[in-house]
Structure formats: structure tokens, C-alpha cells
Image (cartoon, coloured by chain):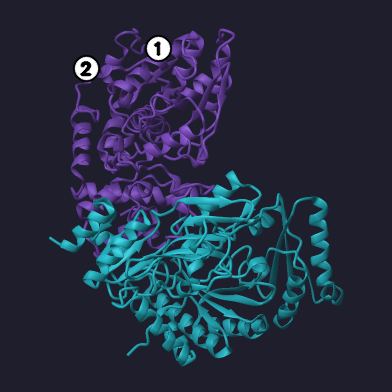
Chain colours: A purple, B cyan
Amino acid sequence: MKHAEILHRCFRCGYCKLPGNYTDFNCPAYAAFRFETYSPGGRMWLLRAWLENRLEPSRRFQEILFACTACRNCVEQCALPKIKDELLAAFTAGKEKLVEEGKVPPAVRDCLTKLQQYGNPYGLSRKKRTDWAADIDVDLFAGHDYLFFPGDVGAFDSRGQEMARSVATLLRHLGISFGILGAKEVSDGNEANAMGESALFQMLAEENGRHFQELNVKKIIALSPHGFNALKNDYPALGSDCQVFHYTQIVAAHVDRLSFPEGQPPMRVTYHDPCYLGRHNWEYGAARMALAALPGVELQEMDRSMGDALCCGGGGGNLFTDVIGNGPESPARARAAEALDTGADILAVSCPSCAVMLADAVKTSNMDDRLQVKDISEIVNARLNSAFPAGE
Amino acid sequence: MDPFYDQLAEIVGPEFVSDAPEEKYIYAMDPGTMPPCEPDYVVMPGSTEEVQKILRAANEHRVPIVPLGAGLVLSGLSRALKGGIVLDMKRMNRIIEVNQMSRYALVEAGTSQGMLQAYLKKHCPDLKHSAPDAPPAATVGGNVSIHGSGHMSHAGGFHSDMLNGLEVVLPTGEVARIGSCAMSSYWNARAPLPDLAGLFLGWAGTTGVITKLAIKLYPAYPLNDVGVFVCEDASLVPDILYRITGTQVAEDVTAWMSPKPDWAAGFLHCNVNYGARTQNELIWKRNLIRSSVEHYIDEKTGGFLPLPGPMKQRFLEVPARQLSVFADVRKGGGFEYVGAIMPVELFPEAYALGLAVAGRVGVAYSMGCRVVGVNHSMMFFYAYAFNRADPDDVARAQRALEETNQRVVALGGVPWKAEAPAQQEIIDRMDPAMFAMMGRIRSVLDPNGIMNPGNWEKNG
């Protein structure tokens, strides 16, 4: 197994379980399950025991590994500078070995099978990939400045589709020239990679990359930070040389072009940093810059923000596999409660997976009369249209 | 089918009990050198009532109970030496009350040091607790119960001295409150009632399960500084510490000696941390501390290190993250230390002892001490790094720890949170009447001997 040589170097001091300000447990899997086995240090020691034949890869063992949301909090907080950068790679390598041995939880198996067969984790026909754009008439890419890449959640999940439509509408307002791959698009593969299926990731990435090349795509706007991460960091090794942006970066750079109606009611917003934009790519500014440009919007930071943000629990394939579960101690519900504590009316997100997870948590926790989950583009559009007062 | 497992699941909920190989493996050991001892169950209670029910069930079935905080003692005290239940207390982590005027916090025992620190910073920024240098995941209850010490120990003594009151579940399931909370809604003092808290401090979880505790808080200053007095002669250190602590303006006074980094090798460093509300007060305190050791500066036998900003920040960090990095010295994820409670005058002999053991056994070491009280005592630590993937290296560290414990005891020190072998050393030296009394107390509190058996027991 790759990175096996670092497993024994974990001291299990537990810094990895916490954010930098120690407010509360910040490893989503540990916070949800509370057994030490689910902490990053526990996973390190379990992996070592497995490799040394002291433990069998039982169903529980598999669930412990796949409950990891790849949020990178452990990498951020590990006290050991010489191994910290490899922690997440070691967990992914462990998942990869389980995948190779065919020892994965059924939900993971099903998700990977759908990705392989349909090119998306929902098991839906490729033809449906453009359904999200049916009402807004988005061009297929043909020499546009940008390719807009909605990704799986933006294309297939109803909440993700709303977000994709909202972003596309805003890009138009901003005067951005963009088109989409449409039915040619397949999953960006980020989740396949995070679940240890690197061969499947490569297959998906190569298919998308071939289309990028055929259509001479130079610049891509990703809806999802997960897609942004794969396209930006993993595709170049497979030959893709596109410049990749997350949509919030485009909005931040162009928001000054917009005119907002005056006299808008105040709106208290807190922002949830997505892991694949924040800890994976150190992008903490774009969404905040976009919000700062909006009249009447007041940003209230949560105790855990930026590099300390608590993951929504949807990463590492968990949005589709739900290995981490959605019980009372789930990270999404904890995050929703933290957002409500700020006094904000709006929980702003910039990731469709976070939007799905947190909207569900807000509803399950009966907070939906006090807190709405809105993505950055929806907030900007609302201010443009002045039809979205605070607390609506 | 395991009816006892079902009973536990009914008490805490099925998601908080496990007898799976994965939990048994991880909870069998801590990061130190002690060999693993597997529990039969790991259980995570969420309330005092659940702890009561678990203890009653354990009594009924004669199942051992091993209370666990963050599992960071490193000396294996929370291993299930006789099997049974490891009771992971970290779900009980509510901060129940902060009494600002009387400067105390009432918390559940599984509250982490980091969580309390963060809570106070946010809600009561002019208060702080004495955080140990254990990682922030360490629990408040665990640290107090082992007589820990920390960043206010010069001012306030051992963390057990900072304890205002306890709620404990006795081995037989009754709940007892100790201190002013036994008859009042305030948790402000252990005096003047008979002080039963001692029945649960230093006993390694053999007398009950602490579920709530109140600890003293101290002023948190907006301005903080540290001075590092350095000398080359260990025989001077007791007097240096005596003079510095005599000013009574510092919060924390520690000494450290380490062969790495190179600039530190061969020198003895005394860190003096202090804080103030104003710049003038800070300067006044700095001058007072400096004047206390002016004699050595004039003699050119010691002086304060000039500290670049980043280095000063590292010395001011609470807890000191850098300490965990020692675990990677051997690229092997491990260190363990003997912490010896000793009078400060033994510092030179204690230091020589550590150098001798480290040299003879050939282990990577770091040494130092934290002054507890106004030079009333010190916790002298001998930390030895090891590579956990190399059994010979682990064995070497174990030998160094055992030899250190033996020599510390011979010198007149008492090993802190002693490993099972060190407990035997202590028992052999202890006043027999005290040991007999410990046994009588345990038999009264824990008639079925379910509480962390194997600890504080004479072998054979």
C-alpha cells in the first residue's frame, strides 16, 4: 500500500480531531461516531494492523475507512510536519487496497458501479445530464470563452440543478461567454478518486479530457469544488492543460460589473467553506469577496471557518454512499446548528454537495423556519432582483 | 448473542457500544510502550445516569470497568488489564457553567482541554484555566484525576489543587457530590467539609468514575510574555527557580534540557511565563523577574536568551504543539516519559540521573521540569522517543523508563501516573500502613473489585 511507511509514525496525539481553535471535534467521522477508531489516528493504526495481518478487513473496518470524508482537517492540524501532508493520501491508499480486494461497503460498491456504467453516481442516463438547463437554454460549447462544468450533483440532484441554473443565470448577467459539454460530460471523477478507485477516475478523466481537447476548451468554470479540485489538480497529469476556475472566483472577479437596486433590506449571512475549495485549494477569499460586494449583506463568521471549517459530511463519496450517516451527531446537523448560532438567516454555500447536505440537515433539525441554505450565486441573483429579503 | 452486550446497548444506545475487533484493538493500548490489553467492550456513556446503569450492570456481572479520557497518559493506565469495559467518557463533554465572579468552571469530565479553552476565549476572555501541555484533546476530568499540572501550576499548584468539587459515580452505582456542591448550588470550594475528593485523585480510576467537576479559573491577560533564563550548571537551577518563583509574578515556570536543537544542547533553560493587563505592568513584572536572578547575570553564570518573535510565540503557545513533534524524533510515532514528583532541590541529581540512563541505554531523550507552586515541588520529566515499528527500539525505551523509575524512587521522587511496573516500585517503597489503607478503602467502595483491576495492586 502506498504511504504505508508513515502509518506507524502517527502518535495519536489527537490534534487531527480538532480545528485550530479547538472549539469542538472537527473530524467529521470522529464527530459522528465518537469511537477512537474513526479518528484519523485510529485509522492510521488500524491500517497498520491490517497490513501486518493483525486485523481482518471486516465490514466495520471498511466503514471506518469509507466514513472518512477526505475533508483534510487532519492534514491541516496534524502536529507532525514530516508526515502530515501524506495523511489523506494514506487513507485513500487504504481505500484503494480495499477496492482492489473487492472489500468495500455495499453502498460504495454500488456508487462505483454506477460511475463505471453510467458515468455518474446516480445511475441515470447520460441524456438526462442536460435536464438542469432545459428551461434556461444554455449553449453547447462551441468556441466559447469558458466551458461551464456542472458536475454530477449540478446535473442530476434537484438541489444541485437549482444551483447550476442559478450560476448559469448569473454568469450570463456577468456577460461571461460559456457553453457546456451536455450529454458528453461524465463525472469529473473526484469522488471515484477519493474512494480509492483511481483506475475509474482515470477513465472518467480521460473521457472528459478528450472532449476538452476536441472542442479546444481552454478555460473551465466548475460549479462544484470537488470538480474544481479534480480538473485543476488531477487532470493535468493526464494531459489536460485547461485553466480551471471555481464559479465563485469568476463571480468575485466580475461582480463589480453588476448594478444592484438601492435600499435593500439587511441580510445576515454566514458562509460555509467547502473542503475542496478551502483546505484542498486554499481558496477562502472569492466567496467572501462576492458577498462583500452585495448591498445590505452582513457576513457573520462561524467559530469554525476557513481552514477550521467543519466538513458537511458529503465528501469522500459520502453524499452518495452515506457511510457516515445522517444521525443527530452528523457533521451536517452540527454545522447547521453552528450556522444558526451566528444569528444568520442565510447559510451561504458554494458547493452543490454542501447545499444538498446542509439543506437536508436544516430541514431534519427543524431549523428551516430560521435558516435557509443558499449558494453564493443565488444570493447575488436575489440582490440583483431585490426579491429575496432576509429571512424569506 | 451476548446478553451483557445487549444490556449495555440498551443503556447507551447501540451506536455507542462496541465489541468489534477494531475498537478492541485500538482501545487496548495508548501511544506509550505498555503492551496491549484488549477490553471486551468499549462503551461511551452520554450522562451520569448512564454511567450509573453501566456500573450497576458491571457489578451484577462482575465485569471490570476502565474509565478513559483521551487516552493520553502514555503509561497504559487505561488499558483493560483484566478485560471488561473501557468506558470512553468523551461524549460527556458539556460545559455546564462558568461562574465568572468566583472564577470556576463546571464541566462534564470528558470535556477536552481545548474545548474549554476555546469556550473561555469566546465567552469569558478575561478568564482561563490551567491547560496542561498534553494535546488539547486531553480531558479535564482525566488530567485532574491523575494530579496533572499545567500553565498555571506555579500560581495554583497541581490541577488536583485547583479542583473545587466533584460528582462521582461510585463503583456500586451511587452518585456522590463532593465539596461545596454537596450542599449548595455553588461549586466554589472543597473546604470546609471533610475532603473526600482525595478518594478519587491519583487512584487510576480504581475507586469510581468522575462525571462532573469544577475547576478554578484564573485571570487571562491581554499581554503575555516569556523569558528564558539559560545557564550551564545544573546545581544552580534550584536556586534560580527559587528566586524566580519567589517574585510570585509568573504564571508558569518550567525548565528544559534537550540535545536538539543544536543551540540548546548542553544548556539548562528556565522558561518564565507571565502576563499583564498593561504594558507598564508587563515591564514591571519583567524587571522583577530579571532582578531576582541579577546576581547570576552579574556573575556571568547565566542570562536571558534573546528570543526572536516566532520562537517566543512557540514558547507562549498553550498547549505547546511542538511537544508532540518529539514523537517523530525516531521517525516512529512514539515517546513516553517518566514524570517524577520531587522536591526542587533534587534537580541536579535528577538531571544527572536522566543523562546517565539515556547514555547507558542509548535512547533519544528530552528532559525538563514544571515547578508546582512557589517552588513547593516539581514534576521532572524524562521523555524517551522510540520507533514503534522497531520492537528493539520500543524495548530500549521501556528499559530506560524502568531504570529511570527505579532511580527516581531511590532518589526520593515519586513517579507520576505510574505504569504498572512503576506502581510496583512505589508499592514496595510505600508506607505499608498507607497501602493497607488504600486496600481497605477500595474494598469498601468497590466490593466486587470491578474498578480498573490490576492497578495499585501488589503483584503475586
| x and y percentages locating residue A27 in the rendered image | 41, 47
Residue at 56% in and 18% down = A266
Q: Nearer the viewer, mark 2 or mark 1?
A: 2
Q: How many marks?
A: 2
- How packed mark 2 is, by other alpha carbons closer than 10 Å (few <14, some 14-19, many 20 or more), is few
Residue placed most toward the observer, B336 or B202: B202
Q: For the residues tagged 2 and 1, is the chain the same?
A: yes
| Circle 2 SS class | helix
Q: Identify the amino acid type marked 1.
A: Gly
Which mark is on residue A143? 1
Callout 1: residue from which chain? A
| Circle 1 SS class | loop
Q: Earlier in the sequence, mark 2 or mark 1?
A: 2
Q: Which image quadrant for residue A319? A: top left
B435 vs A298: above or below: below
Q: Is residue A76 visible?
A: yes
Q: Is residue A265 left or right of residue B71?
A: right
Q: Is residue A32 left or right of residue A127?
A: right
Callout 2: residue from which chain? A
Q: Is residue B119 left or right of residue A46?
A: right
Q: Is residue A49 visible?
A: no
Q: Identify the amino acid type marked 2.
A: Lys
B258 vs A217: above or below: below
Q: Residue furthest front?
A: B183
| x and y percentages locating residue A281 in the rendered image | 48, 36
Disc 2 + disc 1, Cβ < 8 Å: no
Q: What residue sits right under mark 2 in the picture?
A: A127
Residue at 58% in and 22% down = A292
| x and y percentages locating residue A337 in the rendered image | 43, 36
| x and y percentages locating residue B398 in the rendered image | 43, 79
Real-space Cα distance between discs 2 and 1?
A: 22 Å
